[in-house]
Amino acid sequence: MAETVWKQEGFSLVFSEPSVYVDNQARGRSGHMSHAMAEFSENCVIDFNSNCSAVIWEGHMPHGVIEYRVSRDAGVTWGEVRTLPYSVQALYDGLFTVSVEKAVAVNGRIVAFCLRNTPCGCEPWRTATWITSDDGGETWSQPRELSGYRGRVYDARAHEGKIYALLHCNDARKTFTGNDPEHVYRLYVSEDAGESFRELSVVPIPVYGRGYGAMIFRPDGSLAVYAYNVRDERHMGWAVSRDGGLTFPERGASFLDKRIRNPQISLLDRTYILQGRAGEKGFVFYTSPDGLAWGEGLLLEAERGPCYYSNGIVLNDPAGGKRLLVQYSDIYERCCVNAMHMWVKKV
């Protein structure tokens, strides 16, 4: 995939040629899930990836450990590979394995949200946990349980000194999408930089067939929450709160012409960027002026699947302004993946 220029009305998005961030092919491993990233001080970024089996389910399984690296120049260069102690202990104990899909930072503290998978599989799930680091990933706290509900934290955001976490309460014993009235999305908040969390609300998105999830605070202070619909991949459900996540009176669904799975939302220079897997195959991007109505999608990769689990973080650009760092999984053989980096710039 070479550099791509995507012309929009009034601006363009420039996608850099992707580079290999984690070469799992060279070490005979895979990297399913765990693409969390967080900026814990200016230009200092922590980036997680999984180091998992290339044999179990042909590499499409998070059985392994979590690694991370730190950049101190806004993602231009990265430090040494470190292994997350929590994931190593979990693997040694054999009760579950750990994934880290989302992380945020408040006042220099990194807060990483952990999914606990069945030992040699993705599902079923245990209760979600979180861990913290106050020294840029040098040391980590002991894990704490987010709530008594089994499930998966699909997104987390830091906003005005608070931390918000979106938990899909589904143990995934049948499937990861909602199949029971109790499989709701619950929103949790921390007002003490990740020392504790409390439930804020149940997001009124329909339960059945919903999975994955994303959220973003918009410039007007409203909070938009999104959910994938396995029954209709061309319509992504959403709910909007204007009181900090207490109530969600505005609800609807956005049409996406090339479909979406595992949606990820970013805001780059007042343009919303949505990325994810385009249904069964392909890596797709959309743009929106308001985060609700999305234009025609751009399919950057059309052939390979299942891959394109991803995350994005907006960072300072050494050339000036901001740019979006996208990390995603890219198949090299069977379902085994490398972790890739790609930059998106608005011009």
Image (spheres, helix red, strand yellow):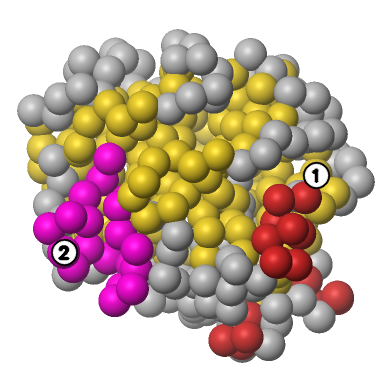
Q: Quadrant of residue 39?
A: top right
Q: Is residue 265 above or below residue 319?
A: below
Say which residue appears at 41% left-offset and 35% top-offset: 165
From the viewer's perspective, tell me whether residue 126 is left or right of residue 28. left
Segment colored magenta = 168-186
Q: Is residue 275 magenta?
A: no
Q: Is residue 198 visible?
A: yes
Q: Which residue is mark 1?
A: 69
From the viewer's perspective, tell me whether residue 125 is left or right of residue 229. right
Q: Secondary structure at mark 2?
A: loop
Q: Which residue is mark 2?
A: 180
Q: Quadrant of residue 1?
A: bottom right
Q: Secondary structure at mark 1?
A: strand
Say which residue appears at 35% left-offset and 31% top-offset: 188
**Residue 43 location in percent, x, y?**
74, 23
Q: Is residue 295 above or below residue 346?
A: below
**Residue 29 location in percent, x, y?**
76, 76
Which quadrant holds the C terminus?
top right
Q: Residue furthest right?
A: 80
